[in-house]
Image: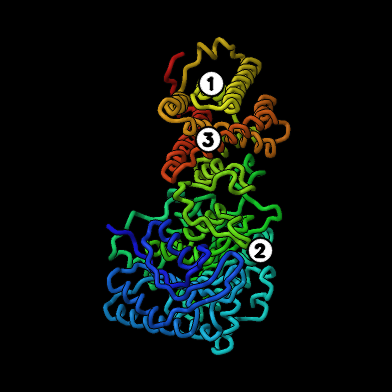
């Protein structure tokens, strides 16, 4: 079956970074087939637009009619429309299509309108005479409008001149200086623009340069901060690289799913998005916040979070009209990337949105996919192509990569580790915040439970050290990798010595009893054989990922317990905590994490490969928690293998 077909109606960029060039590359990258209707030619490079040659409106319509008479279109993206005549001609034709669809009981195709007025470099791309026609005739026909801040300001200013529409109270009008714009102003602007006709408006906040503290303060003021009472939990897990619910959904289903009049089940969408790429979702009333700017869920990765030095973030505001007058807001808060590769950002976002709608996704899901796609494309962009802002890398998935690799963004040193951790929040939290850990923190953990664990963990470490030694002997390792792996094996040996010392001094268990008198439990056996099987059947990256939750998790637990343990804690518990929070152990873990990233950088994981690694990581987290389950609940203990 053929892929979804997406039509772009826009201008050409001779520099290749924006316009239909960006649109078609985006369509291809997201698994759709791109069609194009050209409205204008531009003489353009990274520094600006030096000339525009508009196509006659009759020829624009000829292109459009030629395409749709032969090829079914599943979504339309509209960009640079150039002048009044082209805008008017397209509005007339789209109204005819809408009337025809209404008469046949259909809903028409989704239309994404990017009101291209000013280029990233500052060039004027839409004549003033066309703006009134655009507002009056085109906005009511589109499914979603995607203005940036300067475009939102112009739309509101022009609307106030020739309509009765008012942009709202003076204090909520957009600031004339983009960088002075505040979040409530962006939200008010989105709602005001929606009154002009479009059922949904996405105000892009790239020009605002908000700070994380501003976002936090405002969200806390409406009780929608990260610790708010209505945080969404992930109910189902989806692939981090997935951009479609299936290869090519059935065509008759596309019309139904993408209808702008079809109610969106926002809760189902949010449950899918929760936890993906570390997304934290909170909700209060008609405001939903999806944040990917937060530090990862780990003290170990905390210092290396993808945060810019001055704590800047970007917030995009999606407003959707609802049956009541209030409407609904979804705020997408993401880290500000330190990159000059931003040429064509608006074109890319709107075309990604159209491609996702064509695939049958809801408006909320499509917006999330588009924002994530643009974020990755900027991070992998070409910054030194010309003298001005460089273009995005629209085809970054075809390199192929399932994540932004270390080295592409200076502030993110451990992207694979962070991706694996962020997409396993349920498993990770069940592991590092296990009742065993909480009992260590407040001293309530029975010593008998601690003794059981120490004996079983000693047996585990014996196998674990073998794993690291086996990894060090693998062919293809560099001397540096062999050195790191050998150091990790030595670290396991030192950890085993700690266990032996505690067992001898605190519980009177001799080395002979540990080695020859302790049976392996079901949980220990399951975990060690899982890791050994991974070592035999998979490559070195799989093995490193299989053992990473143990390293990173214990480093996390050690740091957390150091901060939260009760005063006067049992000295044996304290010795265990200090071992894992020590500088020596934390340094070894850092080296292990760097080794994982180095292996991934040599052979960048595809989306499918990343999914395999994620499953391995998730399984290891569950198996770690399983060993502690046995320790705290004697009814779960089952001794299986004799020494």
Residue nearest the viewer, comparing 77 with 35: 35
Q: Residue at x 54, y 89 (%)?
A: 163
Residue 252 seen in this snapshot: yes
Residue nearest the viewer, comparing 30 with 535: 30
Please give the residue where the numbered disc 2 appears in the rendered image.
209
| Circle nearer the viewer, 3 or 2 | 3
Against 208, residue 385 (above or below) is: above
Q: In x, y percent, where is residue 329?
A: 53, 68
Against 198, residue 594 (above or below) is: above
Q: How many marks?
A: 3
Residue 217: quarter of image: bottom right
Mark closest to the chain's N terminus, 1 or 2: 2
Residue 10: quarter of image: bottom left
Please give the residue where the numbered disc 3 appears in the rendered image.
599
Q: In x, y percent, where is residue 303?
A: 67, 44
Distance between the Cα atoms at labels 1 and 2? Answer: 49 Å
Against 364, residue 245 (above or below) is: above
Q: Tell me the quadrant of the picture where the N terminus can be found.
A: bottom left
């Amino acid at each position: 079956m053929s892929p979804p077909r997406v039509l772009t109606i826009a201008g050409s960029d001779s520099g290749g970074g924006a316009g239909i060039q960006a649109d078609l590359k985006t369509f291809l990258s997201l698994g759709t087939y791109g069609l194009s209707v050209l409205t204008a030619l531009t003489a353009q490079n990274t520094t600006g637009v030096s000339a525009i040659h508009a196509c006659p409106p009759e020829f624009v319509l000829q292109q459009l009619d030629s395409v749709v008479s032969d090829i079914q279109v599943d979504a339309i993206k509209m960009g640079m429309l150039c002048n009044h005549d082209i805008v008017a001609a397209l509005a007339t034709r789209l109204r005819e299509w809408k009337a025809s669809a209404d008469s046949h009981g259909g809903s028409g195709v989704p239309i994404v309108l990017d009101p291209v007025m000013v280029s990233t470099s500052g060039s004027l791309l839409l004549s003033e005479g066309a703006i009134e026609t655009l507002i009056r005739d085109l906005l009511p026909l589109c499914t979603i409008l995607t203005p940036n801040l300067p475009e939102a300001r112009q739309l509101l200013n022009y609307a106030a001149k020739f309509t009765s529409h008012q942009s709202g109270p003076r204090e909520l009008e957009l600031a004339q200086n983009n960088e002075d714009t505040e979040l409530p102003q962006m939200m008010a602007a989105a709602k005001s623009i929606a009154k002009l006709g479009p059922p949904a408006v996405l105000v892009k906040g790239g020009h605002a340069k908000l700070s994380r503290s501003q976002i936090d303060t405002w969200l806390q003021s409406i009780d929608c901060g990260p610790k708010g009472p209505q945080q969404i939990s992930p109910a189902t897990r989806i692939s981090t690289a997935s951009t479609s619910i299936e290869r090519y959904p059935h065509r008759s289903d596309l019309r139904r799913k993408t209808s702008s009049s079809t109610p969106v089940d926002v809760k189902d969408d949010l449950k899918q998005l929760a936890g993906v790429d570390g997304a934290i979702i909170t909700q209060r009333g008609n405001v939903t916040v999806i944040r990917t700017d937060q530090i990862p869920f780990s003290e170990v990765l905390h210092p290396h979070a993808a945060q810019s030095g001055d704590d800047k973030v970007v917030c995009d505001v999606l407003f959707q009209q609802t049956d009541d007058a209030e409407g609904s807001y979804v705020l997408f808060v993401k880290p500000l990337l330190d990159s000059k590769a931003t040429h064509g950002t608006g074109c890319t976002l709107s075309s990604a949105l159209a491609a996702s709608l064509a695939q049958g996704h809801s408006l909320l899901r499509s917006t999330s996919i588009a924002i994530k796609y643009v974020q990755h494309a900027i991070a992998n962009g070409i910054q030194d192509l010309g003298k001005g802002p460089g273009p995005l890398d629209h085809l970054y998935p075809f390199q192929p990569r399932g994540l932004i690799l270390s080295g592409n963004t200076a502030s993110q040193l451990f992207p694979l580790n962070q991706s694996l951790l962020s997409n396993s929040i349920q498993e990770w939290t069940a592991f590092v915040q296990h009742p065993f850990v909480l009992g260590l923190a407040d001293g309530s953990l029975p010593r008998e439970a601690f003794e059981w664990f120490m004996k079983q963990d000693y047996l585990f470490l014996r196998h674990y050290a073998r794993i690291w030694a086996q990894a060090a002997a693998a062919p293809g390792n560099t001397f540096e990798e062999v050195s790191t792996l050998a150091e990790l094996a030595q670290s396991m040996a030192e950890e085993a010595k700690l266990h032996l010392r505690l067992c001898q001094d605190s519980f009177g268990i001799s080395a002979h009893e540990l080695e020859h008198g302790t049976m392996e439990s079901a949980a220990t056996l399951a975990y060690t054989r899982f890791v050994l099987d991974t070592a035999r059947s998979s490559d070195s990256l799989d093995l490193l990922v299989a053992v990473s939750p143990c390293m990173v998790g214990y480093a996390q637990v050690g740091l957390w317990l150091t901060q939260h343990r009760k005063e006067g804690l049992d000295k044996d518990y304290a010795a265990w905590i200090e071992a894992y929070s020590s500088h020596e152990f934390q340094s070894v873990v850092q080296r292990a994490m760097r080794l994982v990233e180095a292996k991934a950088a040599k052979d960048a994981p595809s989306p499918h490969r990343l999914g395999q690694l994620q499953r391995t990581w998730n399984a290891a987290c569950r198996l770690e928690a399983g060993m502690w389950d046995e320790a705290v609940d004697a009814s779960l203990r089952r001794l299986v293998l004799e020494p």
